Amino acid sequence: MISLSVDAINFAYLISVVLFTIGLKMMSSPKSARKGNLWSAVGMLIAIAATLFEKQIIEYHYIILALVVGSAIGLYLAKTVKMTGMPQMVAALNGFGGGASAIVALAEFLRTTAVPSLDVSTTLVLSILVGMVTFTGSFIAFSKLQGLMRSAPMVFRFQQAINVMLLLLTLGIGAVFVYSPMSNMAFTELIVIFAISSALGILFVIPIGGADMPSVIALLNAFSGVAAAMTGFVLSNNVLIVSGALVGASGVILTDIMCKAMNRSVWNVLFGKVGLEIDMGAKGEQKQVVHYTPQDAVAMLDRASSVIIIPGYGLAVAQAQHILHEMTKLLEKKGIKVRYAIHPVAGRMPGHMNVLLAEANAPYEQLCEMEQINDDFSETDIAFIVGANDVVNPAARYKKDSVLYGMPILNADQAKTIMVLKRSLKPGFAGEDNEIFYNPKTMMVFGDAKDTLTKIVSLLKESH
């Protein structure tokens, strides 16, 4: 077996950290995100190789087998998971990261015979606590997004009090373990922490509604990083500490961005119960809207000089991003200015719409953040909404009893004409009926977005 000096190992770890940092920076822009992923992957490869050389690995067969099986599963998921399933996959990956950190920390405790120091025993407890909360919480989020559970908040009496009691109980048992980490009950104490933390993760996420899933995914991503960093202390592995800290910090920043985009605090996201179930028969379906056809839509588009497209989760469901991009190219050939307005929480995960449109090769310069483009709607001929709902709901501005109240929205209702492609009048995740559907300026074109856009593209080609 090849052995490397401590200096060589640390130098390899330093290179990995630099590559992680560069990759993370590049991922802040859709244009460079793919290269950023590659840089980060190379950094991880170096870190794994250095760790294998650093540790006294007696048997490599299981490691190689795990690499092959894990790579095969990852490749399969990358090829088969659709954009509509991407939020669920991200939630699952967060969960696996947290669970792996907890298991590795526990395994390290079982492997070593030396008495763990105060910092090691403390981070061991925290790794299991945060890791298992992340694991079970992420799979509750996965189940809600996948439709295996209802997305509305699931609450019961004394729920928050029970959560606080379980957390205090976990911390109390953790304190006992830290005080005497080599006692006869030490392993039992860790298993109890393992079990209670798993329950905490479930109870932590079930009261959170579907409207808050982008923020929850970002927060769980931060938790997975924190769990990894804690495990890094347990293993005395510098690169795991730094990489975990990078993930944790970026997750916290992203959570803050998501919360600001909804004008809400993290506390309100966790305990606000946004996403209540409503009686559809008692709301939007009783109001009257005017139905328009793809022919009507094309007639309006032909007369427009500027169009702002607002994508939402419905675009991902219909897998209509490619045909939408084809439509934009046809409009541009007619001399029409076309841009995309991207709301930070559109879709079901942070950056969902950016990834979706990048998959269709939409020009990066056409993707505009809310702050960049919101003032332009009043001078725009058509706000073209495809599958978006809560992020354009005017109730967020003035309806104080609405769960959306105070959330910054895209000013689609200020455009000269509002064109909405949607299957029905069903509300978004927040369960709030959308008044923009009933605006006199609104043209509702009902149907599957992909089918509707295909008809629009065909008609645009005929009129070219």
Image (cartoon, rainbow, N blue to C red):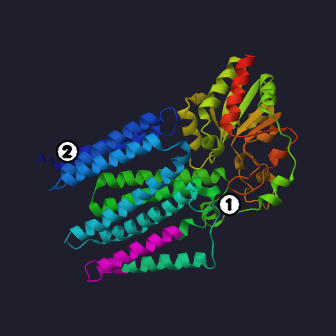
Q: Residue 243, percent across and down?
A: 37, 51
Rendered view: 42 above or below 151: above
Q: Which residue occupies the foreground of this view, 31 or 86?
A: 86
Quarter of image, res 190? bottom left
Secondary structure mainly formed by the magenta segment: helix
Q: 140 left or right of 131?
A: right
Q: Which residue occupies the foreground of this view, 181 or 72?
A: 72
Q: 411 left or right of 6?
A: right
- Residue marked by disc 2: 8
Circle on res. 275: 1
Rendered view: 100 above or below 300: below
Q: Secondary structure at mark 1?
A: loop
Q: Secondary structure at mark 2?
A: helix
Query: Which amino acid does the dot numbered 2 rest on?
Result: Ala
Q: Is residue 24 visible?
A: no
Residue at image x 53%, y 48%? 85
